[in-house]
Every structure is written in C-alpha cells, then in structure tokens.
Image (spheres, helix red, strand yellow):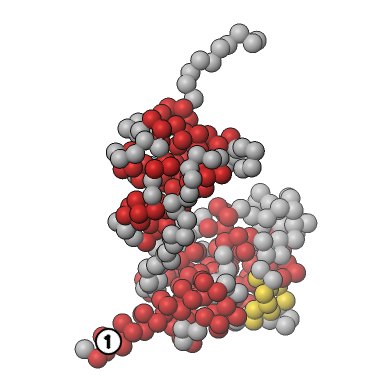
C-alpha cells in the first residue's frame, strides 16, 4: 500500500560499524570506503558478493588495529610494517591475511590515498598441503554396505574406481557409455571399462529401462524427479547415500587417485594422463604418495 516505512538499520551497516571500532579515524575512513567499493563497485571495479566482502574485511581486520596504534592513515604504513606482521603468520593464514590488505592498498594507491603500495613484491608464499591419507578398509566397507540400489552402487563405482567427481557423474550421458567396446567417457576423457563397472552399468540400465521405459532424458543417471524432464540429477541426490560416511564420494575419489600414485609410483605425468589432473594437483598427489612410501620404508627398517 506504500505506507510502510522500514527504518531498521541494515545488518551490513551494523557489521561494518563493529569492524571499524578501535581504528584510527583516518584508517577507519579509508577502510570503510574500501569495504563499500567492494560491495557496491566503483568506476573501475565490479561489485562483489556480500560473502566475499565479509571475508575480505574480516581477513584485513587483524592488521588494521595494530597499525592504528602507531599511525593515523594508511599512507604511513611501510613495507617493513607489513613484513613484520606477516612474519607471525604461517600457511593458509599467511595467504589469507596478506591477500586482503593487499587488496586494500591496491585500492588506496589507485585512488591516490597512498604514495606507494607497501605490500608490493611481498610474496604470499606457497600453501603447504597436508599429506593425503588413504582410507582404511573398514571405512570403504561401510560405504559399500549403504549402497543398496543399482544407482548408488554405480555412483560408488564411478567415484571409487574411475575417480569421477560428483558433478561429472551427474553430467554423464547415455552416449558416454560404450558397452560394446568397453569404454566410458568421463569429462571428455575415454576410460576402459572394468568388469565390475560394466556389470553395475548393465544392472542400472536394466533398472532404468524397466522403471522409466518412456523417459526422454538422455542423462545416464536419472531419478523420479528428472525422469519426466531433460535435466540432470542434482549433486545432492547423487551424494546422498554416502553423506555421513567417512568414505564419502569425494574421499573415495581422492583415495583412488592416491592409490594410483602409490601403486604406479609418484609420477605426476602419469596421474595427469590417467585422470586429467592439472599440474599442481598431480604434484600434490605425487608428493603425498612419496611421503607415505618413505614413512612405510622407515617403519620397515625399524
């Protein structure tokens, strides 16, 4: 009716005011302008999603009170101040809490608020991933036990044998399966069909044919909701059976790739060729396999 006046304060304003408490007036004003540009965009920047704005502002927050104790404006912060701050950080924390202040200083330099970007040429550093650990047989057995339908058994095999991601499983089409030549195309890469996956595919196709004989959906995996459409099954439906298990579909996929590295040697080129991994991911699996093999050799020596 046009008679309601909403005078409540937006949650963003309350959140931003809380984040600016305790800062020097000059630094608070500059940090506020930067945060608003992240949210609303500017002449040379696109607006970010609100979650991204919160993330950046929260990650920049620890450094700003420390600099506010000594300075009134961002232009007074030196490279030594930034180096001193990041020396106390390690790993992912160092990466996150340096990227956000760097965004702040890049914006300030672009708008003429500082003379020099103190975060320039300070390397974030490579994030050191933990060693991937293989699943134990009991964890895998529990996931196998809950796969009681033709669809869930096939989904389990695609993740555990062919290292297919949930989204890749959902986008598989009937034409991706070549039973005659025992071939399966996953994300554009043709893989040989093993006996188990071939049997599970036949079981599922027979179930699919008897349950939805008139469906026009060409996706390999369909359910009651998608059988009358042409859209793919949701990621939620695909991973539902393994949710809550230690060996989820994602863990099974990772375990399959790690098993390949342990069996055939920690060769990133081999992993990239077999699974279509990018260079960094293949090297991560190779590094984890090498560390596990070295640990096993040390235990045998003892």
The quadrant in which the N terminus is found is: top right
Q: Position of residue 235 (x, y in %)?
A: 58, 55
Residue 36 vertical placement versus 126 (above, below): above
Residue 138 vertical placement versus 34 (above, below): below
Q: Residue at x 31, y 43 (%)?
A: 66
Q: Residue at x 26, y 85 (%)?
A: 299
Whether residue 153 can be seen here: no
Q: Position of residue 133 (x, y in %)?
A: 38, 72
Residue lying at the far bottom in this picture: please name it.
301
Q: Residue at x 39, y 63 (%)?
A: 246
**Left or right of residue 69, residue 111 in this image:** right
Q: Which residue is mark 1?
A: 298
**Left or right of residue 289, residue 257 in this image:** right
Q: Nearer the viewer, residue 160 or 56?
A: 56
Q: Nearer the viewer, residue 194 or 268?
A: 268
Which quadrant holds residue 64? top left
Residue lying at the far left in this picture: please name it.
302
> How would you rate the neighbour count of disc 1 (Cα within 10 Å): few for under 14, some for 14-19, many for 20 or more?
few
Residue lying at the far top in this picture: please name it.
3
For label 1, the SS is helix
Q: Position of residue 18 (x, y in %)?
A: 38, 31
Number of numbered tags placed on the structure image: 1
The quadrant in which the C terminus is found is: bottom left
Q: Nearer the viewer, residue 210 or 57?
A: 57
Residue 210 vertical placement versus 186 (above, below): above
Q: Nearer the viewer, residue 10 or 200?
A: 10
Q: Position of residue 279 (x, y in %)?
A: 55, 74
Whether residue 286 can be seen here: yes
């Amino acid at each position: 009716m046009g008679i309601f006046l909403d005078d409540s304060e937006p949650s963003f304003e309350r959140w931003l005011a809380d984040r600016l408490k305790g800062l020097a007036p000059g630094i608070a004003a500059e940090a506020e302008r930067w945060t608003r540009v992240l949210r609303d965009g500017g002449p040379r920047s696109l607006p970010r999603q609100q979650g991204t704005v919160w993330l950046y502002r929260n990650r920049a927050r620890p450094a700003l009170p420390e600099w506010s104790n000594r300075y009134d404006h961002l232009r007074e912060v030196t490279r030594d101040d930034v180096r001193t701050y990041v020396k106390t950080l390690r790993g992912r924390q160092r990466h996150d809490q340096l990227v956000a202040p760097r965004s702040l200083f890049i914006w300030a330099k672009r708008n003429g608020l500082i003379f020099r970007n103190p975060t320039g040429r300070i390397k974030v550093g490579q994030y050191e991933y933990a060693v991937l650990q293989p699943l134990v047989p009991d964890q895998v057995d529990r996931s196998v036990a809950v796969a009681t339908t033709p669809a869930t058994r096939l989904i389990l095999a695609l993740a555990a044998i062919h290292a297919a991601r949930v989204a890749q499983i959902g986008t598989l089409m009937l034409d991706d399966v070549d039973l005659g030549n025992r071939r399966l195309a996953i994300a554009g890469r043709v893989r040989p069909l093993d006996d188990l996956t071939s049997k599970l595919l036949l079981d599922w196709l027979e179930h699919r044919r008897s349950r939805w004989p008139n469906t026009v959906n060409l996706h390999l995996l369909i359910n009651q909701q998608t059988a009358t459409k042409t859209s793919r099954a949701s990621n939620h439906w695909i991973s539902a059976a393994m949710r809550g298990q230690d060996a989820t579909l994602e863990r099974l996929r990772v375990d399959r790739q790690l098993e390949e590295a342990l069996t055939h040697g920690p060769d990133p080129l081999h992993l990239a060729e077999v699974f279509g991994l990018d260079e960094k991911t293949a090297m991560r699996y190779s590094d984890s396999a090498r560390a596990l093999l070295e640990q096993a050799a040390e235990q045998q020596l003892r």
